[in-house]
Amino acid sequence: MNQILQDAYIVSAVRTPIGKAPRGVFRNTRPDELLVCALKAAISKVPTLDVAAINDVIIGCAFPEAQQGLNIARTGVLLAGLPQTVCGMTVNRYCASGLSALAIAANRIRTGECDAVIAGGIESMSMVPMMGNTPSISPHVFASDETVGMVYGMGLTAEKVAKRWNISRQAQDMFAFRSHQKALAAQAAGEFSDEIAPVTIVEKQPDLTDQTIRTRTHTVQLDEGPRSDTSIEALARLAPVFAKDGSVTAGNSSQMSDAAGALVLVSGKYLKQYGLTPLVRCASFAVCGVAPEIMGIGPKAAVPVALRMAGLTRHDPDWIELNEAFAAQSLAVIAELDMDPEKINPLGGAIALGHPLGATGAIRAATMVHALQRHQLRYGLVTMCVGAGMGAAGIFERV
């Protein structure tokens, strides 16, 4: 018997502020605590939903070990006070982990396996470094030109993209500068207020003068990354950090970050049963492979597939969240897909706001969801490149 697929809807989308790593506001905040904050905030947006009806919580994490190991999704479920009947699963597709979690959640609803799932992402790059604590690479990776790109540093892959697609240093710096300017303008206009769940931090420090413990409590409400002191001149003075004669610098690359995001997805049945208001419908998801040494071009492969699955053309998305892993790869993708620059990252991207790896897909999705609502736009696209040679894309429709 053929089963009729049902639609999956996002009814809540939140994220924490994004802190700089490794010395930013969340340097001493455990990733499971950030995740709990996001989960609680997402659930609070849909108070009529019975939390016992949530089937699963699927969380992306690029380096799921140490403080963010031990299936942090299930840890987050229990620490957030959800019923023990609610399950948890951690998934890893590097930078697309959060978006992949969202895709898995949507597909489980579409097939009728679930009616309510929370999807999201978490990453503390302050506590768990890039590559993890004890990376161990198979020696077979080095055996051929086809696989050795897997061990290239991400910055080196950006250099290769810049060279192959003839992306100049000046173009990269201008792209980075505009990212900061857009993010600063968005903060000033309160564009992120609907999506950000403030995080309260409690810090305790000994005072040796009177032998007491002093407690300081403060609430983080804004992303830490955007810099008002950034200028084209300042960016131009930065030296390349990945290749001696290269063009990729710390200034035109994404920032290492700490953050979490969470989105609540439900079926049409639950929309009616719990009186929920849909924000967007999950239209399609795609992930495609590319050569590892030019992993940054990944969206070039994934976006056309996602558009075709949704029955759309490249002109249809009204709002595009293109993760800015590097200015070089972003510009190459924009050129290859002939994207409208005015539709891309109108509120800034990862160069200014930060890129907390496994959380970024969920964060970019939350930004897109609220932007579609705020500006009454129909279609949104979230896309990103992925380490080891992949690209991922998701398309959403405001309803």
Image: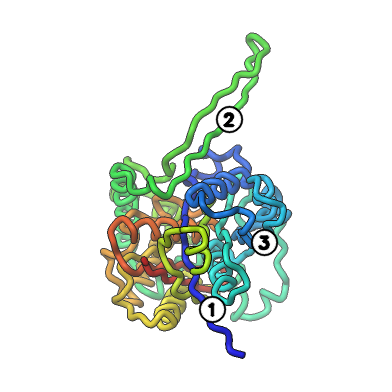
Q: Are marks 1 and 3 in contact (CB under 8 Å)?
A: no
Q: Residue placed farthest to the front in the image?
A: 273
Q: Label 1 amino acid? A: Gly
- Label 2 sits on residue: 202
Query: Residue 236: where, in percent of width, then height?
Result: 33, 52
Q: Earlier in the sequence, mark 1 or mark 2?
A: 2
The answer to which image quadrant residue 174 occupies is bottom left
The circle on residue 289 is 1
| Mark 1 or 3, closer to the camera | 3
Residue 29 horizontal side relative to residue 69, left or right: left
From the viewer's perspective, is residue 141 above or below residue 153? Answer: below
Q: Label 3 amino acid? A: Met
Q: Within 10 angstroms of label 1, few (less than 14), some, or many (20 or more) residues?
A: some
For label 2, the SS is strand
Query: Residue 334: where, in percent of width, then height?
Result: 34, 71
Q: Are marks 1 and 2 in contact (CB under 8 Å)?
A: no
- Label 3 sits on residue: 89
For the residue pair 115 and 70, the one nearer the viewer reads as 115
Q: Earlier in the sequence, mark 2 or mark 3?
A: 3
Q: Within 10 angstroms of label 2, few (less than 14), some, or many (20 or more) residues?
A: few
